[in-house]
C-alpha cells in the first residue's frame, strides 16, 4: 500500500484513465483487424474455392453430356437428329470454354495454374476428336465413328478428366487451409476477449486501491508540534 500513498491524486486518475483508454484502443484495433481477416478468408473460401468448384463440376457434367450425345449421334440415322445433336455438342463445348475462362479469373495457386494448363492442352485434343467423330457419323461412316469414339475419343475424355479432378481436389485442400486459418483467428479473438476482461478486473482493482489510499490520506489530520 505504501506505493499508493506516494502517488499524487492527479497521477492516480491519469494513470487509471490512461491505462483503460490504451487497453480499449489496442483491443479494438486488434479485434477489428482479426475480424477483417476472418471475413476476407471466408470470402475467399466462397469466391475462390466454393464457386470455382461448382464451375468445374458444371464443366465435367457437360463433358459427360457431350459423351452421351456423341453416342446418340453415332446410333442415329436421321439427318435432322444429326443436326440437333451436333448443335448440342457445339453449344456445350462453347459453354465449357466460357466456364473455364470464368474459372481462370479466380485466384489460383501455382499447382492449380499448372493443372489448368494441362487441361487446356487436353481440351484441344478432345475437341478435335469430337469433330472427327461427328464428321464420320454425319457422312454415314458409323463403324469408323464408333471405333474412333471407343478408342481415341475415350482416351481423350479420360485424359481431360484427370486435370479437372486434380483441380477439384486442390480447391478442397486450399479451402481447408483457409478455414483452418480463420478458425485460428477466431480462437485468438476469444483469447483477446478473456485478456481484456482480465485487464479490466486488474484496472478496477487498481483504481479501487488508489481511491482507498486517497481517502486514508484525506482522513489523516495534521498534528502541531511545539518546541520548548
Image (spheres, helix red, strand yellow):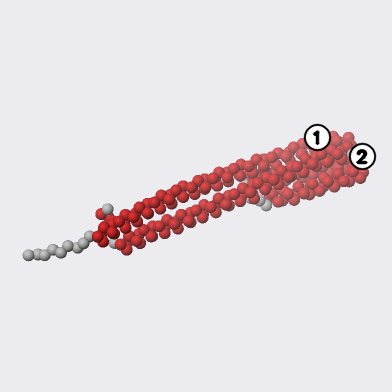
Farthest residue in the left direction? 228
Sort mark 2 into few (<14), some (14-19) or many (20+) by Cα contacts within 10 Å. some
Residue at (70, 39) in percent of width and height = 162
| Residue 7: % across, % down | 28, 59
Label drawn at residue 117: none
Compared to 40, does 115 lie above or below?
above
Note whether residue 6 is visible.
no
Residue corresponding to mark 1: 151
Along the viewing direction, whichever of 21 and 69 lies nearer the viewer: 21
The answer to whether mark 1 and mark 2 are in CB contact below 8 A is no
User: For numbered disc 1, what is the local secondary structure?
Assistant: loop
Vertical arrangement, residue 95 with respect to residue 69, above or below: below
Residue found at x 82% / y 42%: 130
Residue 205 left/right relative to 87: left
Which residue is drawn at the image coordinates 89% and 43% (left, top)? 82
Distance between mark 1 and mark 2 Cα atoms:
22 Å
Work out whether mark 1 precedes mark 2 in sequence or the reverse, and give the earlier one. Answer: 2
Quadrant of the rendered image containing residue 208: bottom left
Task: Look at 32% across and 61% down and name the residue there.
Answer: 11
Judging by the rendered image, the residue that carries numbered circle 2 is 77
Q: Secondary structure at mark 2?
A: loop
Instruction: Report if residue 109 is visible in the image.
Output: yes
Q: Position of residue 166 (x, y in %)?
A: 67, 40
Does residue 200 appear to the left or right of 107 in the view shown?
left
Q: Nearer the viewer, mark 1 or mark 2?
A: 2
Pinpoint residue 35: horizontal percent, then vertical percent.
Answer: 53, 52
Residue 157 found in image quarter: top right
Amino acid at each position: 500500500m505504501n506505493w499508493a500513498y506516494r502517488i499524487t491524486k492527479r497521477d492516480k486518475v491519469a494513470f487509471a484513465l490512461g491505462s483503460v483508454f490504451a487497453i480499449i484502443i489496442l483491443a479494438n484495433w486488434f479485434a477489428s483487424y482479426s475480424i477483417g481477416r476472418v471475413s476476407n478468408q471466408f470470402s475467399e473460401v466462397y469466391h475462390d474455392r466454393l464457386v470455382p468448384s461448382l464451375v468445374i463440376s458444371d464443366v465435367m457434367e457437360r463433358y459427360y453430356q457431350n459423351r452421351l450425345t456423341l453416342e446418340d449421334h453415332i446410333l442415329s440415322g436421321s439427318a435432322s437428329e444429326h443436326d440437333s445433336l451436333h448443335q448440342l455438342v457445339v453449344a456445350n463445348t462453347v459453354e465449357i470454354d466460357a466456364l473455364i475462362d470464368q474459372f481462370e479469373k479466380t485466384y489460383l495457386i501455382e499447382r492449380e495454374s499448372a493443372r489448368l494448363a494441362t487441361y487446356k492442352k487436353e481440351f484441344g485434343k478432345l475437341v478435335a476428336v469430337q469433330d472427327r467423330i461427328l464428321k464420320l457419323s454425319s457422312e454415314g461412316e458409323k463403324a469408323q465413328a464408333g471405333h474412333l469414339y471407343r478408342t481415341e475419343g475415350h482416351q481423350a475424355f479420360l485424359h481431360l478428366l484427370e486435370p479437372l479432378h486434380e483441380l477439384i481436389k486442390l480447391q478442397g485442400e486450399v479451402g481447408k487451409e483457409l478455414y483452418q486459418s480463420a478458425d485460428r483467428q477466431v480462437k485468438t479473438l476469444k483469447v483477446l476477449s478473456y485478456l481484456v476482461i482480465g485487464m479490466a478486473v486488474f484496472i478496477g482493482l487498481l483504481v479501487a486501491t488508489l481511491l482507498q489510499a486517497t481517502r486514508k490520506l484525506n482522513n489523516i489530520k495534521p498534528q502541531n508540534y511545539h518546541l520548548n
